[in-house]
Amino acid sequence: ELYVGNAKQAAHFYKTAFGFQSLAYSGPETGVKDRASYAIRQNKLTLLLTTPIRANNPIADHIFKHGDGVKALALTVEDATSAWEETTKRGGKSYMKPKTLSDKHGEVVMSGIHTYGDVVHLFIERENYRGPFMPGFRKWESNYNPPETGLQYVDHCVGNVALGQMNPWVKFYEDVMGFRNILSFDDKDISTEYSALMSKVMSNGNGFVKFPINEPAEGKKKSQVDEYLEFYDGEGVQHVAMATNNIIETVTELQKRGVEFLNIPSAYYDTLLDRVGHIDEELNALKRLGILVDRDDEGYLLQIFTKPIEDRPTLFFEIIQRKGAKSFGKGNFKALFEAIEREQEARGNL
Ligand code: FE2
């Protein structure tokens, strides 16, 4: 769930630019008096866009402080009551006690705890629900339905936390959520001439949920994480990676629809095949679109990063296609961060 300044317009943007489909709506017309929410979906990706409709409202305060940003990362669970009881017993701070929502389509049980910054995790139990989205929402039938762009599911969601806070949040995901640290990057892996960061990837038991946690590291100039923390006015979600089965088709379509991506210098492609070996995709297509490639022991991955999707240099999206690789593109960090630094420089924030 994103809190945004204008959910009606944001929904139009995500439909037009990314190919999300209208799913459900709640607001004054459905009996919710303080906010409007639009649920949009593409395959297994579901975004909920929420805006306050009055000033005196915690959602309005959130937007005043952070701008548009991710409020909740919701996780499907078998039992939202025991998920809340267990995580709060282990030290998680409650955001929402278990509550049951019901309508003619069945019932949903939800609960939630706080994580870094103002972000929360919601636990959603929906085995007994057959409606379009959630109780309290009505189906959203729209006459405007741009086609999908091939986006499939959330691959990972990355959080930016303050200096010294990565390891405490790693411990939170281990102790409270029962996650494991599956990968770590230090400032030697992730540094350019100017800026550096450290990152640890936390994952649940079946490996489907992946939450990398970044913190800034000492560099000559302000790191991209520092810039985020300054403009988001605190910790929060830096990017959401959305998977596709055909990145060339998806990115071609997204660019046609106006999604802006970071520019990668053409020199990156001069030595790419020496570095990653044989790939199925045509090099020229990757070069034209600015898609990055990296290989690990298990295969390779293709990825590309949007520019921030609002005026604050905060939240952005990654598009990723995995061909065996389970890693996060370590070989691309340098090229990627240099591209981000060129954007920071243009904003006067490097
Ligand atoms: Fe990523």
Image (cartoon, rainbow, N blue to C red):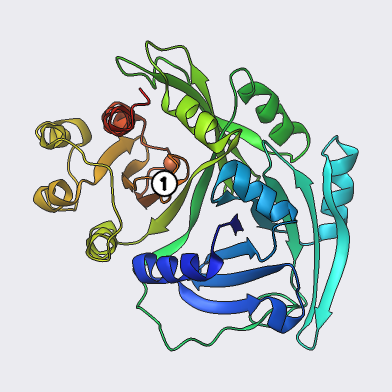
At horizontal 61% and vertical 50% (from top left) the residue drawn is 63
At horizontal 48% and vertical 86% (from top left) the residue drawn is 142
The secondary structure type at the circle numbered 1 is: loop
Q: Is residue 206 visible?
A: no
Q: Where ligand 1 lies, by image quadrant?
A: top left
- Outermost residue toward the front? 55
Q: Which residue is mark 1?
A: 311
Q: Along the line of sight, which residue is nearer the eye, 159 or 180?
A: 159
Q: Is mark 1 within 8 Å of ligand 1?
A: no
Q: Along the line of sight, which residue is nearer the eye, 143 or 338?
A: 143
Place of residue 9 in the rendered image (x, y in percent of width and height, measured from the top left): 47, 68
How many numbered dots are placed on residues in this image?
Answer: 1
Place of residue 13 in the rendered image (x, y in percent of width and height, measured from the top left): 41, 66
At horizontal 57% and vertical 83% (from top left) the residue drawn is 140
Q: Amino acid at mark 1?
A: Asp
Quadrant containing the C terminus is top left
Place of residue 194 in the rendered image (x, y in percent of width and height, measured from the top left): 33, 16
Q: Along the line of sight, which residue is nearer the eye, 84 or 219?
A: 219
Q: Quadrant of residue 222?
A: top left
Q: Quadrant of residue 295?
A: top left
At horizontal 38% and vertical 65% (from top left) the residue drawn is 18
Side of 147 relative to 116 (left or right): left
Up-down relation of residue 187 to residue 33 (above or below): above
Q: Quadrant of residue 308?
A: top left
Place of residue 323 in the rendered image (x, y in percent of width and height, measured from the top left): 33, 50
Q: Is residue 114 visible?
A: yes
Quadrant containing the N terminus is bottom right
Crowding near the residue tagged with mark 1, few <14, some 14–19, many ≥20 C-alpha atoms within 10 Å = few
Side of 36 relative to 307 (left or right): right
